[in-house]
Image (cartoon, rainbow, N blue to C red):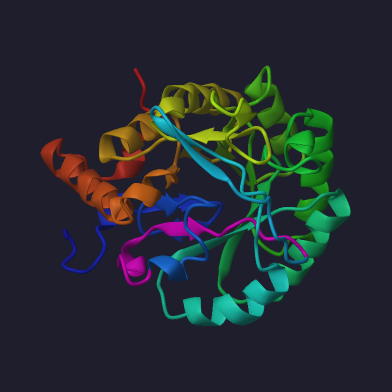
């Protein structure tokens, strides 16, 4: 690497006063609690990762089958299975303390009060860099996408969460809306420090022999390369609508994919579905970004943010 250490300073970015070694972040729901990848990649090289959605109390998730492969993507309806915020603080955070990477705690609840309860518990934990408010999960019947589809409800929750939070607040947007820029503006006006987008797109797959949905939940969230052009377009729209850092998400599997989001206006990116078929993809994207800087004589990746011509 350019500085003779494990990280290339040309790739460093900053979000709400937090320095990330590079813009590559493992996406919530695909990266466990980080520790699951510790034997597969060097977590110290990662810009950061977002935990599984954490609720105030443990959740069992939906019954299987919960994942179905599709052309160019994947449908999932996990239902936010997680160990709960308290167990994360007491059992996972102490083990993560040895790693030099940014930990983003993804937070979920079925009501405003449950979101705030989870944040209050997480405030007790050391080593969390920021919270990512999950108002966009399509795989539960309450909370999540119900809040994420309403600018009024999303702004109300954002304002409450900002007051309760001791850390910067990232709000993760749903693509299942008519105009994502309206939603983004409402959330920023309510106090969000950063926006991540997009979450999955609601989809469905049917077994033609049984004539039943392939997922037990019926519908699921579509992710993977199939949604990347939609996600890039939405990042571009939101970048023109608000003046806070953005984190781009949606089908990223290479440095070229990541650069599309950065040029569209994202300060950082999250990698999700690709982790399932290549657990080392985050390292490859970091190496690819370094190679791009070298080959194009780019002094810092920050210079590419929002550079679409």
- Which quadrant would residue 215 be assigned to in this image? top right
Place of residue 150 in the rendered image (x, y in percent of width and height, measured from the top left): 79, 29
Quarter of the rendering occupied by the C terminus: top left
User: Where residue 172 sits: x, y (%)?
Assistant: 62, 42
Residue at image location 39% in from the left, 31% down from the top: 225
Is residue 250 visible in this depiction of the protein? no
Q: Where is residue 300 in the image (x, y as percent from the top left)?
A: 28, 45
- Bounds of the magenta segment: 38-56
Magenta span: helix, strand or loop, mainly?
loop
Q: Residue furthest front?
A: 209
In the picture provided, is 156 more to the left or to the right than 218? right
Query: Which quadrant of the structure image shows residue 205?
Result: top right
Q: In this view, does 73 lie above or below 97?
A: above
Instruction: In the rendered view, tell whether residue 121 sits above or below residue 299.
Output: below
Is 55 a magenta residue? yes
Q: At 40% from the left edge and 27% from the top edge, which residue is drawn?
A: 71
- Residue 202 placement: quadrant: top right
Q: In the figure, 55 relative to 98: above or below?
A: above
Closer to us: 204 or 236? 204
Q: Tell me, yes or no, whether the highlighted magenta stretch contains residue 237.
A: no
Q: Image point 31% across, 43% down: which residue?
A: 301
Percent coordinates x, y for residue 158 in the rendering: 77, 45
**149 left or right of 276 in image:** right
Question: Which of the two residues, 204 or 4, is positioned nearer the viewer here?
Answer: 204
Q: Could one spot residue 150 in this view of the protein? A: yes
Where is the N terminus found, in terms of image quarters?
bottom left
Give the total number of marks visible in the rendering.
0
Q: In this view, does 115 lie to the left or right of 34?
A: right
Give me the residue at 21% from left, 69% from top. Answer: 5
């Amino acid at each position: 690497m350019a500085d003779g250490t494990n990280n290339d300073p040309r790739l460093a970015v900053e979000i709400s006063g937090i320095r990330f070694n590079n813009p590559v972040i493992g996406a919530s729901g695909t990266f466990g609690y980080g520790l699951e990848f510790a034997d597969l990649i060097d977590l110290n090289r990662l810009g950061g990762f977002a935990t599984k959605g954490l609720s105030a109390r443990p959740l069992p998730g939906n019954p299987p089958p919960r994942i179905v492969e599709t052309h160019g993507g994947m449908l999932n309806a996990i239902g936010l299975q997680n160990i709960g915020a308290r167990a994360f603080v007491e059992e996972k955070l102490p083990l993560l303390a040895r790693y030099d990477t940014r930990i983003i705690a993804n937070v979920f609840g079925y009501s405003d009060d449950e979101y705030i309860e989870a944040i209050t518990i997480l405030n007790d934990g050391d080593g969390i860099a920021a919270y990512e408010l999950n108002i966009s999960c399509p795989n539960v019947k309450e909370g999540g996408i119900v809040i994420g589809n309403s600018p009024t409800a999303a702004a109300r929750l954002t304002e409450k969460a900002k007051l309760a939070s001791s850390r910067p607040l990232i709000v993760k947007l749903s693509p299942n809306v008519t105009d994502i820029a309206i939603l983004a503006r409402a959330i920023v006006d309510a106090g969000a420090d950063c926006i991540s987008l997009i979450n999955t797109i609601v989809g469905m797959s049917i077994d033609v022999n049984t004539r039943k949905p392939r997922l037990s939940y019926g519908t699921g969230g579509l992710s993977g390369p199939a949604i990347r052009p939609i996600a890039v377009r939405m990042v571009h729209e939101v970048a023109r609508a608000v003046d806070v850092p953005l984190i781009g998400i949606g089908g990223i599997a290479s440095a070229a994919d990541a650069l599309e989001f950065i040029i569209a206006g994202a300060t950082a990116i999250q990698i999700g579905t690709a982790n399932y078929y290549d657990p080392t993809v985050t390292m490859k994207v970091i190496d690819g970004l370094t190679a791009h800087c070298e080959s194009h004589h780019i002094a810092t990746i920050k210079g590419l943010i929002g550079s679409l011509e």
